[in-house]
Image (cartoon, rainbow, N blue to C red):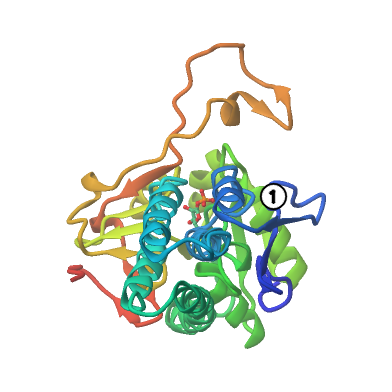
Amino acid sequence: MGEGLRTLLFEGDRLRLIDQTKLPTELRYVMVDDEQTAFSAIRSMQVRGAPAIGMTAAYGLYLGLKKHVDLDKEAFFGELKRQAEFLKGARPTAVNLAWAIERLVRVAHEQRAQGVRAVLNALREEAKAIQHEDERACRTMGENLQAFIKDGMGILTHCNTGALAASQYGTALAGFYVAHERGLKIHVYADETRPFLQGARLTAWELQQAGIDVTLICDNMAASVMASRKIQAVMVGADRIAANGDTANKIGTYQVAILAKYFQIPFYIVAPWSTIDPKTTSGREIPIEERPAKEVTEWGGVQIAPRDVPVYNPAFDVTPHELITAIVTEKGIYLPPYHFA
Ligand SMILES: CSC[C@H]1O[C@H](OP(=O)(O)O)[C@H](O)[C@@H]1O
């Protein structure tokens, strides 16, 4: 689905999202028409993936404020502040969310001298601009990643970094789509990605739809698959990259990076520039979201662990920069030592 199905479709002043909690068994949609519906789609992970949640929050902020078009300017800007803070709290780790909201807030203040309607128009256009920029960034990341993709390669990936996670193509998966378009034969090993199963439910589905060879493995099989020399590279996404290159990504990424180091397999991060947060100097400062215990103790409403057992469910971990071979963005390829400013 590199170019086909759209995770986000903004049309007729409404945002339609693919409901990712229903995949792969059902292709259903969810509509966003204000900040509340945007917040709940992001929090419940109907939409997920750093670029996709940033774009959803941007449209959600515009749509939420549109309902307050009749407020005077002072009250409207008060509402802007409230909704912006509210949306930023939906998920704390992926910096793309705060980045997109801050872009809209900046534009609103630049237009403050104009009327509320002019501010609203500017907000809508900024949200659309973020989406268009993301489309171009995804394609360029995919092209840049070709520097590390060779014909016949086995590639391990974790979570879902595909078209579902962004406007189209995705980040690491963009590279797989471009390689496939160019006739390269690659074989992708997709970690299932406990507990939310983005690898099993989303990556396996996306790659299968696109006709790219994919084999699903459980997370605890990665060492064994690497030991059998099936993997020549690991390529994953990111939710926040600190100035020193430390990278927060889906829980389980860190252990894959350690395994890659052990087996001397290169480990690549692929992310748009908006995922880099130079204000965060190292991974220690990255806030890690904790998700509800039920995501671990239940699946599909079925209990799979003892009732009331204590659960620790961090959604992300931080891979230290020294385990990262290169960071690929739309602006180019970055090699260690990393210094993002
Ligand atoms: C293209 S960013 C994808 C990114 O999304 C992730 O998390 P989640 O599914 O919780 O939004 C993850 O860390 C991926 O690498």
Relative side of 5 to 261, left or right? right
Work out which quarter of the rendered image holds the C terminus and state it.
bottom left
In this view of the protein, which residue sits in the foreground, 214 or 283? 283
In this view of the protein, which residue sits in the foreground, 104 or 43? 104
List the single residue furthest toward the bottom.
Answer: 182
Relative side of 21 to 330, left or right? right
Relative side of 234 to 25, left or right? left
Up-down relation of residue 16 to residue 211 (above or below): above
- The residue beneath circle 1 is 201
Up-down relation of residue 221 to residue 32 (above or below): above
What amino acid is labelled 1 in the image? Arg
Dot 1 lies on which element? helix
Q: Position of residue 99 (x, y in %)?
A: 36, 64
In this view of the protein, which residue sits in the foreground, 235 or 296? 296
Q: Residue at x 49, y 80 (%)?
A: 129
Dot 1 crowding, Cα within 10 Å, few <14, some 14–19, many 20+: many
Q: Which residue is drawn at 63% across and 63% down?
A: 164
Up-down relation of residue 83 to residue 181 (above or below): above
* Residue 266 shows in this picture: no
Determine which quarter of the picture holds residue 247. Answer: bottom left
Work out which quarter of the rendered image holds the N terminus and state it.
bottom right
Q: Position of residue 67 (x, y in %)?
A: 58, 60
Task: Count every numbered label the image shows and give the total.
Answer: 1
Q: Where is residue 59 in the image (x, y as percent from the top left)?
A: 55, 65
* Residue 120 shows in this picture: yes
Q: Position of residue 264 (x, y in %)?
A: 35, 59
In this view of the protein, which residue sits in the foreground, 72 or 133? 72
